[in-house]
Amino acid sequence: MIQNCYNMLIVSINSLLRNNDTNIINFYFVYDEYFDITKFEYLFKKLKSFANVGKIEMLKVENSKYSKLAFINAGNCLYIFELVEKLTCDKVLYLAPYTLIISDITKLYSNDCEYNSTLATEYIYSDDLENFSSFPILNPTILLINVKKWKENNYFKKLFLPENISALIKQKDSCVVYYFNLIINDYELIEPKYNYTEPWRGAGVPISCTKSAKKANKSLQMHLNRPVIITFLGTLPVSKGDFRNSYFNLWWKYAEKTEIYKDIKEY
């Protein structure tokens, strides 16, 4: 977690807990030395106000360890690899800070990931990964992780292998997506409704993914089906500019229920 994602994180947590009030949810946060630790005071207070919050654990990582990967501007999402190394639970659901959870996620978390290290939705712009031969491509913003298999596959170690970093340097676009797909070599795709991001590049840029993913994303875009998790891209906090996400008003509806709303409403 990094500083400029904090407001998005608060809204994401608010939506998760309000729509999953029958589940006890444990939280794991990973941060580095550049994050203002005093902000956790409000976060803990907020979490403790919900009856369905279980344990809360924090892991501090050293940003300098990732210096060779700094050029990909990953928003420090690569810290998830280090966090998983420290976990003792069977599986964990990774949610990016800029998500909105608008339904119960019990069915998602109950997915059996016994035979794969990761469950994820499909990335809809696979043409970006011109130096990558594997298809389909996983979208790394929502991941259901089999902790034991991540450790067995040495994903954290592979993150820093010179040959992987060299391959990454050759990739011009979507470097974060490319690197997750380069490291994670056994995954299963889940329904797009668990990580819906509108085709944010506009009508003139066609999406490139499997036929089933195209069909499912079109139904979500046309509001024929309702997503479970929405990923917001663009200006943070969410604005009508840039990506023109049609769930713009819904994000602000959840933001209004948080104490940070007074600080961000001018956006």
Image: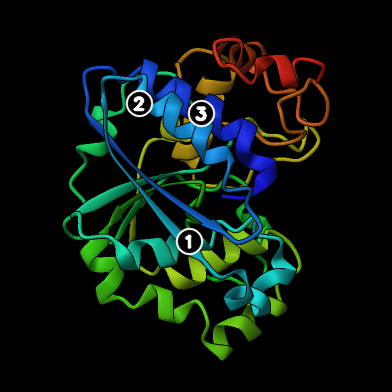
Amino acid of disc 1: Lys
Q: Earlier in the sequence, mark 1 or mark 3?
A: 3
Residue 108 is left or right of residue 237, and the answer is left
Distance CA(mark 2)–CA(mark 3): 16 Å
Density class for disc 2 (Cα within 10 Å; few <14, some 14-19, many ≥20) is some
Quick one: 159 or 86, which is closer to the camera? 86
Mark 1 against mark 3, which lies toward the viewer?
1
Q: Earlier in the sequence, mark 2 or mark 3?
A: 3
Q: Which mark is residue 60?
A: 1
x 21%, y 41%: residue: 111
Q: Which mark is residue 12?
A: 3
Distance CA(mark 2)–CA(mark 1): 21 Å
Distance CA(mark 1)–CA(mark 3): 21 Å
Residue 185: percent from the left, percent from the top? 38, 69
Name the residue carrying label 2.
Answer: 48
Density class for disc 1 (Cα within 10 Å; few <14, some 14-19, many ≥20) is some
Residue 252: percent from the left, percent from the top? 64, 14
Which quarter of the rendered picture does the C terminus lie within? top right
Residue 84: percent from the left, percent from the top? 34, 62
Q: Is residue 99 visible?
A: no
Q: Which mark is residue 7?
A: none
Disc 3 secondary structure class: helix
Find residue 176 and report its image quarter. Answer: bottom right
Quick one: 87 or 260, which is closer to the camera? 260
Residue 145 is left or right of residue 167, and the answer is left
Q: Is residue 93 visible?
A: yes
x 73%, y 62%: residue: 173
Q: Looking at the picture, does residue 246 appear above or below residue 96?
A: above
